[in-house]
Amino acid sequence: MKRFVQMALVLCLTLFAVQAGASPYSDKVTLPEGAVITNVNRLAVGAPLYVQVEETAPSIEILTQVISDASRITHTNIVTYDAVVNGIQTDKGIDLKSLPRRDAAKIFKENVASYADAYIILTVANNSRTTFFFDVYRSGSNELLYTYEVRANKSDGNTVATFSSLSEQFYKNWQRSVEAQNKVK
């Protein structure tokens, strides 16, 4: 009987550890057929598609910085949005931050290949539950390589901490997907 209780306790602790290690958010990875992500050495962060709906929510500038800062957990080299913007301003004399969003996005896509192999565009849907859609495109061809959707819990607010955690989940899953594709090779 004592042995049974010990085994039950070990089983409960193991299940708890597995749950604690899992992501607290619901997420979904999509890798289009034929897409190769193993040869992406540098990822550039593009300007997110985001509208600040609450005063306490991060601004678009802070969100862009949060996406870049969350990359610290990955082995991939990340090129920040500001680095690409500064490079384009130096090389072409165009200030993306002073342009309308659509014009800036077009010029970014046309020039990002000089700075990175692929780029990330984050779309934020902040309805009742904040949802992040990360799309990774090949620089130059703009071919969709990878998508990741992650949804915050209902109790999570639109805060820097939540946005940072969601961004970290993207980088963790990106790294897992690259490693999984490397194993298949």
Image: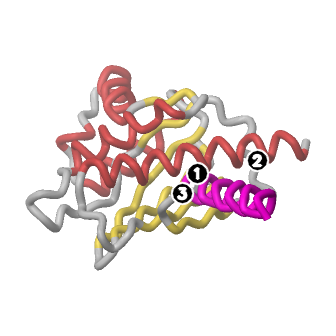
Residue at the location (71% across, 54% down)?
A: 10
Q: Which residue is mark 2?
A: 36
Q: Nearer the viewer, residue 162 or 66?
A: 162
The extreme bottom residue here reads 128
Q: Which residue is mark 1?
A: 21
The main secondary structure of the magenta stretch is helix
Q: Amino acid at mark 3?
A: Ser
Counting every numbered tag in the picture gives 3
Magenta residues, as a range? Answer: 1-21
Determine the secondary structure under disc 2: loop
Q: Quadrant of residue 32?
A: bottom right
Residue 85 in magenta stretch = no
Q: Is residue 144 visible?
A: no
Mark 1 touches mark 3? (CB < 8 Å): no
Residue 23 is tagged as 3
| Left or right of residue 72: residue 95 | left
The nearer-to-camera label among 1 and 2 is 1
Across and down, in percent, residue 65 comes to: 30, 38
The mark that comes first in sequence, 2 or 3, is 3
Q: Amino acid at mark 2?
A: Val
Residue at the location (58% across, 51% down)?
A: 21
